[in-house]
Amino acid sequence: MFPFRSRRSNLTRRLSKATRRGVAGCSMQTGDVTVLLKKLQDAQLDTLAKAVESRGREPTGCVLLPYKEEPHLLCCQTWRWPDLRSVDEIRRLPSCRSKVDKVYVCCNPYHWSRICVPDCPPPPYSRTNEEMLRPEDRAPSEVPLLCRDSYLGSFTTNGDTPSNPSEWCKLAYWELSERVGPLFSVDRPCFNVFGDVAHPDGLSLETLAMTGQRNGYRGGGDGRGGRSPPPDAAVQRTRCKIGLGVTLSREEDSCVWVYNRSDNPIFVNSATLDVAPPPEQSHMLVACHQPTRVPADHCLCVYDPHKAAQNYGWTFTHPIYGPVDPNSIRISFVKGWGQKYSRREIKSCPCWLEILLAPCR
């Protein structure tokens, strides 16, 4: 029996050591954590220790406890976010297999993501110099609405994989102004995009870039393949910082959530996150499209079909010029763009994703 006690004591010490590091400057009472650890079985302690020590990089299972005392809040405060105040501030990762019920809840802190609350709403729509939005400088989803239908039709059939009836989006990976590799079809509700992490259940940007470099395939701004130039040094540095990357999840209500699982922020722009102009000004105003910063370990609803319909709701009576595709989401890793940054447009960002949602495609 002594070896079993020794193993349990060792696991508890490992978790307590991580606890002291995690709650520096926090008013968390150590006694609460001690009581919680005593409720866990040895296998649960082992799972929790692996999750905490690997900081979520090692896949681990659920750690279930009765929901009544909100133990998942205590675990997240202890090992991840000392300033967390309420369970309303966190959201379960799609990879968590435990069922949502009122009896048990998963206490693995790395099965949760903190909900991002933007600092402030995007700036209002303003007049934009047409020279700053030249067609040749735009991503495929940034073409004027007048020609969007015909252009996007050619974009999705330019030699890439054929349309999948069950797909809900396609992914285009860009490095600066060059698209890398073909469009990637996504038909699973939950999908992972990694940086340099080799993982079987998602898309590795490092592997995609190396394959494109080896085969000489880069999509380019016009969607045509071409000889691949050596990657920019800034691109390589940024790609190395992506790590676990992002998880894309299409919920039952058709909303799309992005979970930032890397150690660095991401910057997101979509129709949901923009602010629509007044109807009387829709014929002369162009969206500024400032991105929303999503910190590491945070999540954000980046597409809500109802809000997108309000913002760009297919109700304009005048042609709108500028990047207005309501079914496109753009994510830049590590580096931001726009008025607050040296990069004025996303095509100046080293590594970024374009998510082309299926409804219009």
Image: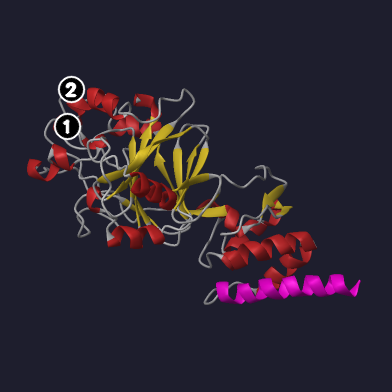
In this orientation, which residue lies closer to the viewer: 265 or 38? Answer: 265
196 is within the stretch colored magenta:
no
The percent coordinates of residue 22 (x first, y second) are 56, 72
Dominant secondary-structure state across the stretch colored magenta: helix
**In this view, 194 is above or below 221:** below
User: Tag on residue 317?
Assistant: 2
Amino acid on which disc 1 is placed: Ser
In this orientation, which residue lies closer to the viewer: 209 or 35? Answer: 209
Quarter location, residue 151: top left
**In this view, 129 is above or below 239:** above
The percent coordinates of residue 303 (x first, y second) are 39, 38
Amino acid on which disc 2 is placed: Thr
Asked if the residue under mark 1 is in contact with the one under mark 2, i.e. CB atoms within 8 Å, the reply is yes
Query: Could you tell me if residue 119 is visible in this image?
Result: yes
In this orientation, which residue lies closer to the viewer: 150 or 42? Answer: 150
User: Left or right: where does residue 175 sit relative to residue 168?
Assistant: left
Query: Could you tell me if residue 315 is visible in this image?
Result: no
Which stretch appears magenta? 1-22
The percent coordinates of residue 39 (x first, y second) are 77, 62
Q: Quadrant of the C terminus?
A: top left
Q: Which residue is mark 1?
A: 282
Instruction: Compute the Cα span from label 2 to label 1.
Output: 8 Å
Other residues around mark 1 within 10 Å, as few (<14) / some (14–19) / many (≥20) = some
